Image: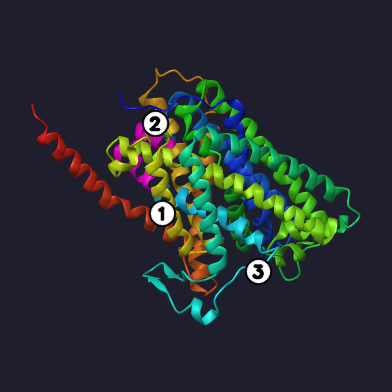
Amino acid sequence: MAPEFKRTIGLYTATSLVIGSVIGSGIFIRPAEMAALLGNPWLLLFVWVIGGVLTLFVAMVNAEAGAMLPETGGQYYFMRSMYGRFWAYLYGWANFAVINTAGTAGIAFICAQYMEYFFVLPKFSLVVEHAVVLHLPFIGDIFPLENIGVKSVTILLLVILTAVSYRSTRRAGALQVVFTASKVLAIFLLIGGMFFSDAGSVQHFTATAGGVHPAGFALVAAIVAACNGALQAYDGWGTMINIAGEIRSPQRNIPRSLFVGLFTCIAVYLLISIAMIDLLSVDEMARSPLVAASAAEKAFGKTGGGIIALLICLSVLGVTNASILAPPRMTFAMARAGEFFAFAGTIHPRFQTPGNAMLLHLAWMVVMVFSGSFYILADMYIFVTWLFNLLLVAGVFILRRKMPDTPRPYTVWGYPFVPIIALLCSAFYLTITLYNDIEAYRLGKTHLINAVFGIALTATGIPFYLWFRYRQRSSLRNRPV
């Protein structure tokens, strides 16, 4: 009998995966971009609430599907039950090609960037950086030699954490709990230190950024663009869904871990943002490349800022660890179903982990690191993520119709209104984001249309799907009767 995964993950570990996968990356770098877009501290806080509520609505839908279909592979199996083999495959391919790999690489970028608080990482001159360029028609240009020092450190971190998860799921899970506990403690110390610091000013909550006063449609576009950062910062809760087949009492623990984890994240993000605004004006936030460290430095001095920067590095490592541990399970599930390369569907005979799937993810993550920066990778993967979130939310109506008698240990609160609101908001966000990306490229503000790049990478999976289906049909025809 082929080895199978054991249900070794309990409620605390599942909840720590939700919190650990969400908190620790975007909140430490995205507020600078959001402040530059909005120019208003209260709008910045409002965007965190919008992003959190929308994420929670989508998570609620996934909680119903997760408790109903608790299998390793998570949302891949949800898509298959909702829409059939092709869309499930395309979702799985998008997770491999964009969502999980580009997302994890982008998160690891943050840790490497915060290391520059302590020492300057090497980089080539602008001439050398632009000497190698990959032009993608209708998408833009990629400069693989840009910021080579940060990219090299990012790759090293990905290799080390993949090695840990490759050898032991239990050790990687235990490491995740340690990272999460350290992160929560560091955040509370950071928030408390900022609030009790004499360096803060309540005037920061009423001052707006000079020259940034969007109105009308420009304000709507700015809020949606800022939501891009918030949604990226809230992303990661699905990591726990992907290992549903290894969670004890999934019908009870999946929805509990999602609710507790996401409510904790919303509260923490608001507190951190309030603390940052208390210490930094919106203008100061917009100008800072390492906004959390800048706020900490103002509160605690240079040494204190360095300590916080180190804690942020550890926090981001926790997010990276969670993102490396769980997502290869979806690739593994696809390979087991004959819809991916067969070698990715084997369990390591000694370590009992999806080792080949992890190595494949590592190789593609390295490619993703060379393809862009944190903002390119983050914006690309979050757009594709919400394309499929739209389908997953719509899928709750399909499952209610197709599988009416299947036991549902948890059902979506506020059905059908909550799913409908989530659908409309997701569609609006995607439309405006695509418009913003194209406009920024057309005006020369960016050299790559991130949303289109993500769609193109997702579409590359279609010919592979046709090949895998052909191979399956050939195997069935040649099977002895």
Q: Quadrant of the C terminus?
A: top left
Classify residue 331 as left or right of residue 230: left
* Foreground: disc 2 or disc 1: 1
Please name the residue shown 77% across and 42% down the image.
Answer: 188
Would you say the magenta stretch is mainly helix, strand or loop?
helix
Q: Is residue 172 above or below residue 127?
A: above
The three-letter code of the residue at mark 2 reads Ile
> What whole-number distance in Å separates the C-alpha atoms at marks 3 and 1?
26 Å
- One can see residue 384 in this view: no
Which x, y percent locates residue 454? 43, 57
- Labelled disc at residue 120: 3
- Amino acid on which disc 3 is placed: Val
Q: Which residue is mark 1?
A: 363
Which comes before the other along the chain, label 3 or label 1?
3
Question: In x, y percent, where is residue 220?
Answer: 61, 57
Q: Can you give x and y, in whole percent of width and height, for residue 406 in the image? A: 40, 19
Query: Which circle, 3 or 2, is nearer the viewer?
Result: 3
Crowd tier of the residue under label 2, counting other residues whose Cα lies within 10 Å: few below 14, some 14–19, many 20 or above: some
Q: Quadrant of the N terminus?
A: top left
Secondary structure, mark 3, is: loop
Q: Provide the residue span drawn in magenta.
A: 75-94
The quarter holding residue 366 reads bottom left
Identify residue for label 2: 398
Pick the front one: 442 or 102: 102
Looking at the image, residue 167 lies above or below residue 308 = above
What label sits on residue 183 in the rendered view? none
Tell me which numbered mark, 3 or 2, is placed earlier along the sequence: 3
Looking at the image, which residue is at 53% across and 47% down? 161
The mark nearer the N terminus, 2 or 1, is 1
